[in-house]
Every structure is written in C-alpha cells, then in structure tokens.
Image: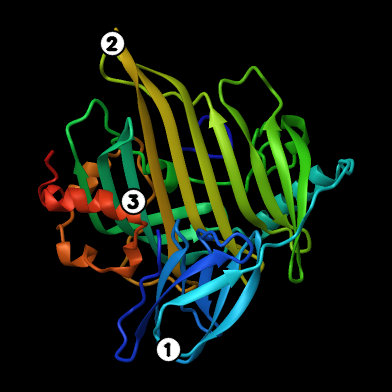
C-alpha cells in the first residue's frame, strides 16, 4: 500500500483437549440497546483461557471447570465480571462507556500523544507473542458469494502486527466468476502499524512526524475503569498523493498503548488481466484491535479488512465487488514453540497454491469453536459444503 503505514494483508479461541473441559456458549449484548457487541474479549478470570465474540456477539469457550468467573471487555464498553455456575448459555451485558466530546482541540495534545504512542511501540517492539490465528475471507459479486477461504496459522506477532506465520489448516472454494482474488491475505500478513526504524521522510501516522502529514482532531475521551482512552481522528494533509487516508486511533492516555485503529483508504488500485475490464472507486477499510499486556506491550486481537470496488465492463452494468476478511489471534504465549518455521508473506504468492499444499481435513472444520460463524456466514459456508466445493476446490 505504497509508503503509508500499511503494506497490503476469527474468531474464537481453540483450546487444547482436556478431560474435564466443558463447552460454554453465550452472547455479549449492550445493556442499553440490547444489540450484540461484536469482537468483545471474553476470558476466564485468572487463566489464559479466552476468546472473542463474533460479529453477532456470540462466543464459545472451553473452560476447565465450573463454576468460574468470566471477564468480558470491549473498548467502547465497561469491563464486567460475572460468575458462571453451569454450562447453560450465558448472556453477558456490557454497559457502554460514557464518551466526553471536547469542545475545542487542545493545541498540540493530539500530535504529542501519538508521538508518545510511537515511542512506546519502539520500546516494546522486541517482545514477541507466539500463538494461532484464524483467517476467513469471503468474496461477493453483486451480493453473491463466489469465493471462500479459511486458514489457521501458527503465528509470531509483535506490537506492529504479524511477524511470521506457518500454515496449519486451510480450505478454499470458489464458483465461476468474473473476478477472483489470488492473494488477498497479504493485507493481513503484511499488516504493520508502524516501523521501529522510521525515517525523517516517513508518512506514517505513528511516527515523530505525524503533525506534518496529518490533520488531527480530538474525537472523544472514554473512561473505562481506571483507563482514560483518547480517540484521535486523522486525515492525510497532502492532496497530491494517489492514496488518501483517514480514520481514528484510540490510545490509553496513561500507558500510551495503541488499542484500536480504524483506517479508510482510497485510491488503492486493482488490476484486471482482462483488457476490457477496469476498476473504479476503490475503497479499503482496516479495523484493528490490540490487547494490552503486563509487559507494557500490546498483542494483536483481531484485524478486519474490507475492500470495495466497482468492476466496469463495456456496455454492461458495473459489478459491485466486495471482499471481507477477518483474522482473530488467540492462544498467545511468550515462549517460542519448537519445530515451527515461521515465514513472512512473499510477494505474488497465491493463496490457492499454498492451500493446495495442505491435506484437506473435513473433520477439522465441523463443530469447531475456532471457526464459529455468524448466521449469514454459516449459510454461505454450508452452500459451498453441500456442493463439495471445499474438497475438490472446483467451481460447483
């Protein structure tokens, strides 16, 4: 993605087998609206067991024993702890955090806070986390799903993003369509929110030069327990660049840890190998959430990527193209496991070619809490499964 802070590239935690583990299911909702709280963190108090709710607020979690205490949190809601006595479905209600909207911009406060966040990232950059990630991608043309892929990676991450990965399980299915995306996962694999060796000419948001390249505004201040979370809006200053960026970043005022980033970019081109096809009005959106650690760093919790573009064809209506991917990171630990060769993404590497190198294992994907889906995703995946598309990787 050119020279900006990303170079284009879940759901629930998959716990190891346990003789006494019990499967706990539930839903996280907003107490005021009753609507689901997507991508909330749910964990067992005092343990490393945890998961993330899906887009419908649903979660599943294997717990070693009951009763137990669950901790649920989400950046725009207050953290809550509740006691669970049995394996019945759990309804978690989170109170929305109050957001104070400042009337004036406080001078250079926003730029200075981003600079402090950058220096905090630099200090903790050497800390690595080893775990797993679940990646799902769905391509839709005019609202019809034409391509699905799911991958489970062994991962090595740092506070900038994915540092290395090794493919563990994968499957891919597609229908005959006007267009397919051969390497969309690169937007996740090469994701990086900052560079620890930034130069004076850097145009990244998280850098010492942020005020030179971005217009900043103070969007709001959220009190989350002892945390005071500052949301800062940003937009590219230069109109001469082909790629324009805007969005918001949320930073813990006390620790200077980056907790959330929302980025919208325009001008990211797509190329077609068909001489009469062209793309127009491309738009990509990144949503990234990070989990603070006890060592002053942050771990990637999830990366959501959305790409929309119009496919132009002579004498025919445009085709609306949308690609959605969601990657959830889980099972993190500081000690590197043995026997895993982590690699970085290679330019031009085909996802389908890589997936074909693995052995398709249908049993792995059935009733697997690591790949829990929303009802819409469930309908899409089942339509491919019923036609045997995943096993053969041929168009149904």
Residue depicted at 54% across the width and 47% down the height = 287
Task: From this view, report whether residue 303 is shown above or below residue 182.
Answer: below
Label 3 sits on residue = 376
Q: Earlier in the sequence, mark 3 or mark 2?
A: 2
| Residue that carries the numbered disc 1 in the rendered image | 86
Q: Is residue 302 left or right of residue 346?
A: right
Q: Position of residue 14 (x, y in %)?
A: 36, 71
Left or right, 203 with respect to 282, comes to right
The local crowd at label 2, few if under 14, some if 14 to 19, many if 20 or more residues have their Cα within 10 Å, is few
What residue sits right under mark 2 in the picture?
Answer: 276
Q: How far apart in space, not on screen, are marks 3 and 1 (Cα)?
A: 29 Å
For the residues carrying marks 2 and 1, which lies nearer the camera in this image? 1
Quarter location, residue 275: top left
Q: Secondary structure at mark 2?
A: loop
Mark 3–mark 2 Cα distance, whole angstroms, equals 33 Å
Vertical arrangement, residue 234 with respect to residue 259, above or below: above
Q: Nearer the viewer, residue 239 or 166?
A: 239
Residue 375 percent coordinates (x, y): 34, 56
Q: How many residues crowd around disc 3 within 10 Å: few (fewer than 14), some, or many (20 or more)? A: few
Which residue is found at the position 24% from the left and 25% from the top?
178
**Is the residue marked by circle 1 packed among few (<14), some (14-19), or many (20+) residues within 10 Å?**
few
């Amino acid at each position: 993605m050119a020279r900006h802070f990303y170079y284009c590239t879940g759901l629930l935690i998959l716990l190891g087998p346990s003789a006494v583990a019990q499967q706990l299911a539930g839903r996280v909702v907003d107490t005021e609206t009753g609507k689901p709280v997507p991508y909330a963190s749910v964990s067992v108090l005092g343990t490393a067991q945890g998961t993330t709710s899906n887009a419908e607020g649903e979660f599943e979690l294997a717990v070693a024993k009951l009763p137990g205490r669950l901790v649920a949190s989400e950046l725009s809601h207050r953290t809550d702890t509740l006691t669970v006595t049995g394996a019945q479905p759990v309804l978690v209600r989170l109170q929305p955090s109050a957001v104070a909207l400042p009337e004036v911009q406080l001078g250079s406060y926003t730029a200075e806070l981003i600079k402090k966040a950058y220096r905090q990232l630099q200090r903790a950059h050497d800390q690595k986390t080893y775990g797993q990630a679940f990646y799902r991608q769905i391509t839709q043309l005019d609202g019809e799903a034409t391509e699905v892929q799911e991958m489970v990676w062994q991962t090595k991450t740092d506070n900038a993003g994915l540092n290395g990965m090794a493919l563990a399980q994968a499957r891919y299915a597609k229908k005959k369509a006007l267009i397919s995306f051969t390497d969309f996962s690169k937007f996740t694999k090469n994701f990086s929110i900052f560079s620890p060796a930034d130069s004076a000419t850097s145009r990244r948001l998280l850098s010492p030069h942020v005020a030179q390249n971005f217009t900043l505004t103070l969007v709001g201040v959220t009190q989350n327990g002892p945390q005071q979370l500052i949301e800062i809006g940003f937009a590219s200053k230069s109109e001469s660049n082909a790629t324009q960026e805007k969005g918001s970043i949320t930073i813990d005022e006390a620790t200077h840890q980056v907790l959330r980033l929302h980025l919208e970019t325009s001008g990211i081109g797509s190329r077609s190998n068909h001489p009469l096809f062209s793309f127009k009005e491309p738009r990509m959106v990144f949503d990234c959430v990070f989990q603070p650690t006890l060592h002053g760093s942050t771990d990637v919790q999830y990366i959501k990527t959305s790409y929309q573009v119009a496919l132009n064809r002579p004498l025919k209506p445009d085709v609306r193209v949308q690609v959605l991917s969601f990657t959830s990171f889980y099972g993190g630990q500081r000690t590197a496991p043995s026997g895993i060769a982590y690699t970085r993404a290679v330019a031009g590497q085909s996802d389908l070619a890589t997936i074909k190198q693995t052995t398709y294992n249908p049993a792995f994907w059935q009733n697997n809490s690591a790949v829990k889906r929303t009802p819409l995703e469930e309908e899409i995946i089942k339509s491919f499964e019923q036609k045997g598309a995943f096993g053969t990787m041929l168009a149904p």
